[in-house]
Image (cartoon, grey):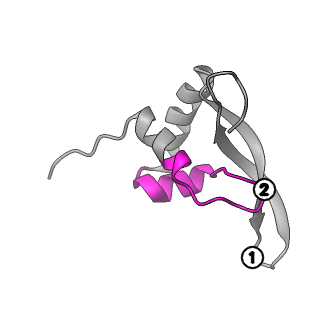
Amino acid sequence: MDKLTITSDDLVLAVLESQPQCDGAGMTSKELAQETGLSNEKIMKRLHTLKKGNRLTVVRILREAIDGRIVRVPGYRLVSDDGMKL
């Protein structure tokens, strides 16, 4: 079986390709793990690297809870070259 390699750039692309949500764009670490097929632990390590490089920022994004309420959960958004959130 071939080894699957996912780079930080692949994670950035996954964030870019995420479906827009009611507050704009953003993905949770669990959503990124599902999208890439990586474990949540590996996703968190890569996200930490991207955050240190000022390519991602931690934000609160809106999601629907199991009971139907709209809640704000931790998520990630890309940061543009000028430092603004995309």
Q: Report x, y in % for residue 29.
A: 59, 49
Quadrant in which the C terminus appears: top right
Q: Who's the residue at 43% across and 34% down the image? A: 9
Q: Please give left or right for residue 39 compared with residue 15 in the image.
A: left
Residue designated by label 2: 23
Q: Who's the residue at 30% across and 40% down the image? A: 5
In this view, the residue in front, 80 or 42, is 80
Tell us which disc is closer to us: 1 or 2.
Answer: 2
Secondary structure, mark 1, is loop
Q: Report x, y in % for residue 42.
A: 46, 41
Residue designated by label 1: 66
Q: Please give left or right for residue 37 compared with residue 41 in the image.
A: left
Q: CA separation, marks 1 and 2?
A: 19 Å
Instruction: Give residue 44's mark.
Output: none
Q: Report x, y in % for residue 6.
A: 36, 41
Q: Report x, y in % for residue 60.
A: 79, 47
Q: Which residues are drawn in magenta?
A: 14-38
Q: Please give left or right for residue 61 compared with residue 4 in the image.
A: right
Q: Amino acid at mark 2?
A: Asp
